[in-house]
Amino acid sequence: MRPRRTPLTNGGRLGRRWRALGIGQSHDGIDPMSLIVELPVGGTYSLAFPRAARTNPYFRKVFVAFCVTLIAVLSLDKVYLQRHNKPDSENVADETDLSTFGTEKSRLLRHSRTADPTTTSGQSLSLPRPQVCSHQLLNAPTRHGDAPIDGSLPAMKAFWDIGVTCFDVDVITLQDGTLLATHPRRLASMLSRKLPVVVEESQVHQWNISMIRDTLGEEVVDVTFPLLDVQLLPQYAQLIEGSPAFFEPTDPQPHDNRYPTKLTAPLLNLDLKQGPYLTEERLMHIVHSIANLQLESNVAICVTELTEHEKLSALDMLDILHRHNLQVITGVSDSIKQKPIPLGLVLRDRAEEDQNVERIRQIVQNHKPHSIQLLVPSFRFESSWYQEIAATPVLSRLPMTVWTVDEPDEYSYALKMNVTAIIANRPTDYIDSEKDAPVENILE
């Protein structure tokens, strides 16, 4: 008996016409008098010969050539429709990835800065723009007539209220183990203004929280420099409650603006500054603080690949956290409720080794499966570097947050690189910038 086949189209007129010729996709068997054709696009097809072609070799050749031509034309037409986001009215099931954005029920979609997402009715779907992230909670929008203090928890809330749901925060480990959510330069600057001597960035780690409060005033410190584990992480957890996950360990989709989940989910990048008091014990305290608040799906710890020389004076966070993640995955960890901690690989355009995309691929490959889940490069890399990243499968599957944008032309350049998020010192300058204009993706 001839094996069962399905028509090339979903019951349309062409499908009925081609079924009469005996053309269909191969299913549960192979007809001994059929030709199996596998095309680069469009699938594998079984061409069942009509009765005349089964007995006449010449007619068989003509029939095969005719059928292959038809299938090739159909396949190319299908690809053309997909690339232009115009779903076939008889076959719209494949368009669910795009229509999901238009039907997402999450409350967080009120923060989306996309231009009029459309459905699969045949209209063009506007691609979502990258998130704009707050760098160090600086330059928050005015609330009730007053601008929140830079770096403060009210600043984070003010950003969240206007739709900025992505944050990049620096963390200092003080002499007494206190974790201050601020950049060393900012703390050093404030201390220097209160003292007769200049405090260098490298010196702030030697201070403890009591010394800082005595110098700057307790109220100033408590507002301006929130504690990471006690204040900032709990507030972030409260803000993102009910929001979608940014990191999904089983997410198979490559990073692409056509897959908008990551473009609306909250993200907190933690840049833990190296210093003499950032120890493995304190690093793991941060990890447990994240896990206790169940933030593993929306927080990334920034890491770098250290050289052997650098490992002599700096904490190898990449190695420590990767070992922790392996223990969580294999069930060795003491807490079965923990998830792997996502790591963001920091890449600097001025570092010659970070220009080497093959080296980056090896770093990511060596820390699989669930450690490095984010790329955090300077936006200043050449477009050819971004193109090479996009052409490398292991890397193209990772979302990318780029730092740090200060000018409109820098923002425009970063937009063209098809990144997930853009870290800016003044996010409010960009969250509504040209929101109705199409994003030119130079990587396609």
Image: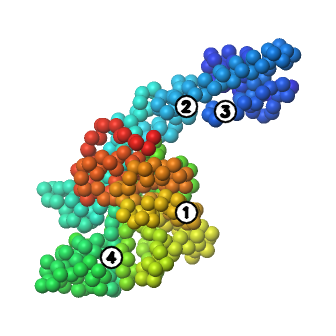
Query: What residue sits right under mark 2 in the picture?
Result: 79
- Residue at 55%, 73% (x, y): give it: 323
Secondary structure of the residue carrying numbered label 1: helix
329 relative to 402 in the view: left or right: right
Q: Earlier in the sequence, mark 4 or mark 1?
A: 4
Q: Distance between the residues labelled 4 and 2?
A: 51 Å
Q: Distance between the residues labelled 4 and 3?
A: 56 Å
Q: Position of residue 314 (x, y in %)?
A: 42, 79
Residue 362, label in figure: 1
- Residue at 27%, 41% (x, y): give it: 434
Mark 3 crowdedness (10 Å alpha carbons): few <14, some 14-19, many ≥20 = few
Q: What amino acid is found at the position of numbered circle 2 in the picture?
A: Val
Q: What amino acid is found at the position of numbered circle 1 in the picture?
A: Gln
426 relative to 42 in the view: left or right: left
Is 3 placed above or below 249 here?
Answer: above
Is 272 placed above or below 381 here?
Answer: below
Q: Which of marks 4 and 2 is nearer the N terminus?
A: 2
Query: What residue sits right under mark 3 in the picture?
Result: 39
Q: Position of residue 63 (x, y in %)?
A: 75, 17
Secondary structure of the residue carrying numbered label 2: helix
Instruction: Give the colouring mode of the picture.
Output: rainbow
* Quadrant in the rendering for residue 203: bottom left
Q: How far apart are marks 4 and 1 (CA)?
A: 30 Å
Residue 172, label in figure: 4
Task: Say if mark 3 contacts mark 2, CB within 8 Å.
Answer: no
Q: Earlier in the sequence, mark 4 or mark 3?
A: 3
